[in-house]
Image: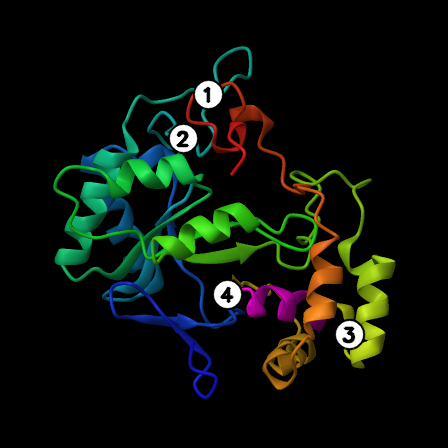
Amino acid sequence: MSSKQQFVKLNDGHFIPALGFGTYKPQELWCTCFRPELVRPSLEKSLKRLQLDYVDLYLIHYPIPLKPGDNDFPVDEQGKLLLDTVDFCATWEALEKCKDAGLVKSIGVSNFNHKQLERILNKPGLKYKPVCNQVECHLYLNQSKLLDYCKSKDIVLVAYGALGTQRYKEWVDQNSPVLLHDPVLYDVAKKNKRSPALVALRYLLQRGVVPLAQSFKENEMKENLQVFEFQLSPEDMKTLDGLNKNFRYLSTESFADHPEYPYSEEY
């Protein structure tokens, strides 16, 4: 990463901001469009909506395919998700073709575990490696093993939920702990004369993670940029490492019975 330009270089030679917020958001291929013949039309539909010729980054949103159609979450009469049988390696090949066509600069994945990444990396005829893996990652879920694996393969780990998520009611248990209220985090923040949010972002940044700091408030966006103005000591980093609980805010239980469910593996 260039401390001057505050960008991270990807394995395909392109760059992404070291801190994602507002001005940079990757586009994602939704689970109902995993069939190879649906990938490019889905991307072109997004480009038309955005009024763009290409996007910087396009991701496979989740490793589990759903039945194609107009419903993002197709279900049967019992309310159970209707799944598809597409191999995401075939989906990946379609993304590679979109990159060759100039519709996207870089391609990656989201919510993949290390074994699923291995399947893409070991795929016969692989043309482009995933540049990143976007996953839930924060002080309560520091993803240390997955991060080490991604670094070993030159894949950038991108963190959503970096501050403990926006606590959307449909996805997050409202009784779950509020990360930014953690007393240990508060003490480290007070010691560094920074806000808990800035310290939580700096922790990820110093570990080589690209945090997505989702905010719609201009003052918060400006404050987030201060993350490049200080460093946490090794002692502070060790203290914050101790907050890991392998705790996920976002519920994906509806996928839990599927063989591709990414969180059945340790990392």
- Distance, label 4 to label 3, CA atoms, is 20 Å
The local secondary structure at tag 3 comes to: loop
Image: magenta residue range: 197-209
Quadrant housing residue 250: top right
- Distance, label 2 to label 4, CA atoms, is 27 Å
Q: Report the residue at 39% width, 27% height from top.
A: 66
Task: Provide the residue designation for mark 3.
Answer: 195
Of 193 and 31, which appears nearest the observer? 193
Whether label 1 touches label 3, CB < 8 Å:
no
Quadrant housing residue 2: bottom left
Q: Residue furthest top?
A: 78
Asked if residue 208 is positioned above or below residue 124 in the image, the reply reads below
Q: Report x, y in % for residue 254.
A: 56, 25
Mark sitting earlier along the chain (3/2): 2
Which amino acid, by three-letter code, is at mark 3?
Answer: Ser
Whether label 2 touches label 1, CB < 8 Å:
yes
Q: Report x, y in % for residue 43.
A: 27, 51
Which amino acid, by three-letter code, is at mark 1?
Answer: His
Task: Provide the residue designation for mark 2.
Answer: 64
Q: Quadrant of the N terminus?
A: bottom left
Disc nearest the viewer among 4 and 1: 4
Q: Report the residue at 47% width, 52% height from top.
A: 148
The local secondary structure at tag 2 comes to: loop
Task: Provide the residue designation for mark 4.
Answer: 208
Mark sitting earlier along the chain (2/4): 2
Which amino acid, by three-letter code, is at mark 4?
Answer: Gly
- Distance, label 4 to label 1, CA atoms, is 31 Å
Which amino acid, by three-letter code, is at mark 2?
Answer: Ile
Is residue 205 covered in magenta?
Answer: yes
Task: Provide the residue designation for mark 1.
Answer: 258
Whether label 3 touches label 2, CB < 8 Å:
no
